[in-house]
Image (tube, grey):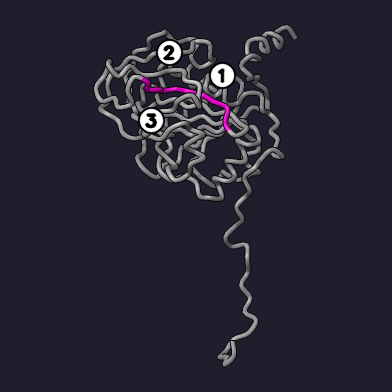
Amino acid sequence: MRRVLLLLLLNGCLGFVANAQSRVLVFSKTAGFRHGSIGVGKTAIMQLGKENGFAVDTTEDAEAFKEENLKKYQAVVFLNTTGDVLNPKQQAVFERFIQSGGGYMGIHAATDCEYNWPWYGKLAGAYFKNHPRQQKAKLIVHDRTHISTSHLPEIWERYDEWYNFKAAPGKEVNILISIDEKSYEGGQNGDSHPMAWYHDFDGGRAFYTEFGHTNESFADPLFLKHILGGIKYAIGNNAKKDYSKTKSMLVPDEDRFTKNVLAGGVFDEP
């Protein structure tokens, strides 16, 4: 009993309580560039789940985005997804998942997908524009009270691939980390260049971190604890989601009608 109370004290203010119902889906379908770190990323997240009290399933099959399936999960992680990965029906299912109180976490190339789905762009917080060569840079940790950043130094120096965004997010998200463009070559978002953020969105929670291009990222204890915090934030305390709050309508199947020929032949009258 004392141990349970301690866990509630540690996690309650963050809205995360590990329980037998906590389950995360890691989605890593690619329709564009495919990152070599996807494999090690999935392995790392599964290990984080095993060590921290939540179950992890992985898939690259967009057919997993069915309402009866997503209802099993508290959060969905888009791990280095690229291109157009969901059809309109699957997009509607995911919108309803978030609106019911579900969580989203995007890792690295999660901003390099679904450019024609504005709702997703707002959920993720930004869209990828381009990137310079991989290099070391200095990251400024603005908020060290969040579960994903409390363990980080104020200036975090690391090697990765640094994205420029088409439009960097602003006040609509809570910025956790930004990058110092003076510390590397190729930055294009100026003095305010966010790299990790979170926000409440459309009934659910969303967290994004730009880091995670390299294989080495998923062996870095600081980065692993960072994404663990992001997953915990996305999970929150939403073991039971409320689908009565959803606004998006399910898209019907294209083959829902059956064609029956009632008459044939040549007609003189219309």
Kindly check if marks 2 and 3 are in contact, taking CB atoms under 8 A apart as contact.
Answer: no
Left or right, 268 with respect to 38, comes to right
Compared with residue 244, is residue 213 higher up or lower down, i.e. above or below? Answer: above
Q: Is residue 255 magenta?
A: no
Residue 141 is labelled as 2
Find residue 259 and report its horizontal and vertical position in percent: 61, 72
Quarter of the image where one finds residue 51: top right
Q: Main secondary structure of the magenta part?
A: strand
What residue sits right under mark 1 in the picture? 51
Q: Residue at x 63, y 10 (%)?
A: 10
First in residue order: circle 1 vs circle 3: 3
Pointer 2 local density, CA inside 10 Å: few below 14, some 14–19, many at least 20: many
Can you say whether 119 is above or below 141 in the image? below
Question: In this picture, which residue range is highlighted in magenta?
Answer: 192-201
Crowd tier of the residue under label 1, counting other residues whose Cα lies within 10 Å: few below 14, some 14–19, many 20 or above: few
How far is disc 1 from disc 2 in space, using C-alphas?
Answer: 26 Å
Residue at 61% from the left image edge and 55% from the top image edge: 252
In the rendered structure, which amino acid carries the disc numbered 1? Glu
Image position, residue 61 (x, y; %): 50, 44
What residue is at 69 percent from the left and 39 percent from the top?
A: 243
Which sits earlier in the primary sequence, circle 2 or circle 3?
A: 3
